[in-house]
Image (cartoon, rainbow, N blue to C red):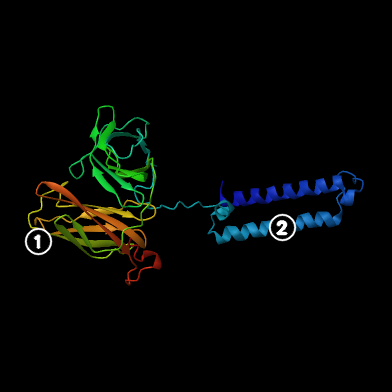
């Protein structure tokens, strides 16, 4: 229907509506009076109906003109806007049709076989994964207070079941992250909670520090986390005060960095910088979504052993100021 036709139909509809309303008013009568004779509308009522129709017709015409001649349908159309959100990884057990399902209950203090599956959009266990950083699956288990960290690599069975030998060091709440890329899909990090029975004694967040000590090794951190931009982080490894220049590759690089936001344990995007030098510096780029404290866990390999250095780092605004919530939480 063209614009003129739409406008005419709209005016006709208004006339019918007002005519029906007038008829109902005659049946009931004002204040419950006896109904008037059918079809004997008063001149005042008829005049009111005609004026209302005319007024609405003028409004419709004005809307038609203001909308550039697209008709009243376009002028009164309701538009729904879909806002795309960038939710950090690890906060959801299910995303893009993929779901993480833990199949065993953890036991504290002794080794156990933890099994899990990832089901796909077809509700079947996923059996095909892409290799990323030398592995098909990166499985991270951290305590909710961020004092315990394990990065392990489970084995995949033909039926889509993953299994890993794991020990939870103390009672309490833990978060497990499955970091993977399914064949034909995009990279995902799904998270699920683990509960270890026993007397739970939560610990405060480790204090803010730029230096971590792991046995004979010292790792120093340079760089700042700034929300809304890619932040360059450089970690320098030394042993007994001497720079380590013969780091061994681990997971396709000379180090692997995991960054988690304190509070909700959001799992953040961290990208290593390619380098031909085997230390002492290892550089990463991290993207943080907000101000607050973050825990960084660096895995590096030397003398055929993988070690983990951990840091608590506040993310600050671009001007270098940090909110009071990011003050030192030392023991």
Q: Residue furthest top?
A: 159
Q: Residue 77: x and y, percent?
A: 55, 52
Q: Return the residue at label 1.
A: 243
Q: Horizontal placement of 80 versus 132: left or right?
A: right
Q: Can residue 39 be seen by looking at this rendering?
A: no
The one nearer the camera, 292 or 209, is: 209
Q: Which labelled disc corresponds to residue 106?
A: none
Q: Residue 295: x and y, percent?
A: 30, 56
The one nearer the camera, 170 or 26, is: 170
Does residue 162 sit above or below 312 in this rendering? Answer: above
Marked residue nearer the N-terminal end (2 or 1) = 2
* CA–CA distance in space, label 2 to label 1: 88 Å
For image coordinates 27% across by 65% down, the residue present is: 224
Closest to the camera, between mark 2 and mark 1, is 1
Marks 2,1: beta carbons within 8 A:
no
Q: Residue 172: x and y, percent?
A: 37, 45
* Mark 2 nearby-residue class (10 Å; few <14, some 14–19, many ≥20): some
Is label 1 in a helix, a strand or a loop?
Answer: strand
Is label 2 in a helix, a strand or a loop?
Answer: helix
Q: Residue furthest left?
A: 246
Does residue 275 sit above or below 139 in this rendering? Answer: below
Q: Return the residue at label 2.
A: 54
Q: Quadrant of residue 230?
A: bottom left
Q: Residue furthest right?
A: 34
């Amino acid at each position: 229907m063209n614009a003129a036709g739409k406008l005419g139909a709209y005016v006709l509809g208004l006339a019918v509506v007002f005519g029906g309303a007038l008829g109902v008013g005659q049946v009931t009568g004002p204040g419950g009076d006896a109904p008037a004779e059918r079809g004997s509308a008063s001149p005042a009522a008829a005049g009111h109906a005609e004026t209302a129709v005319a007024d609405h017709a003028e409004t419709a015409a004005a809307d038609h003109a203001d909308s550039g001649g697209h008709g009243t349908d376009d002028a009164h159309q309701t538009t729904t806007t879909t806002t795309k959100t960038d939710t950090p990884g690890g906060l959801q057990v299910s995303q893009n049709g993929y779901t993480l399902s833990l199949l065993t209950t953890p036991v504290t203090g002794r080794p156990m076989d933890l099994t899990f599956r990832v089901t796909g959009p077809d509700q079947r266990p996923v059996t095909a994964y892409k290799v990323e950083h030398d592995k098909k699956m990166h499985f991270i288990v951290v305590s909710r207070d961020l004092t315990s960290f394990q990065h392990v690599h489970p084995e995949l069975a033909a039926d889509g079941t993953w299994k890993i030998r794991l020990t939870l060091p103390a009672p309490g709440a833990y978060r497990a992250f499955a970091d993977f890329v399914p064949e034909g899909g995009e990279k995902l990090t799904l998270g699920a909670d683990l509960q270890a029975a026993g007397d739970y004694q939560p610990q405060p967040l480790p204090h803010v520090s730029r230096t971590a000590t792991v046995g004979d090794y010292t790792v120093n951190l340079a760089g700042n986390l700034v929300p809304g931009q890619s932040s360059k982080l450089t970690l320098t490894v030394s042993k007994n005060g001497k720079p380590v220049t013969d780091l061994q590759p681990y997971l396709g690089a000379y180090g692997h960095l995991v960054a988690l936001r304190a509070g909700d344990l959001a799992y953040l995007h961290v990208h290593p910088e390619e380098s031909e030098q085997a230390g002492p510096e290892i550089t990463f780029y991290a993207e943080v979504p907000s101000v607050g404290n973050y825990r960084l866990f660096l895995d590096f390999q030397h003398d055929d052993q993988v070690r983990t250095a951990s840091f608590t780092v506040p993310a600050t605004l671009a001007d270098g100021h940090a909110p009071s919530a990011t003050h030192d939480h030392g023991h």
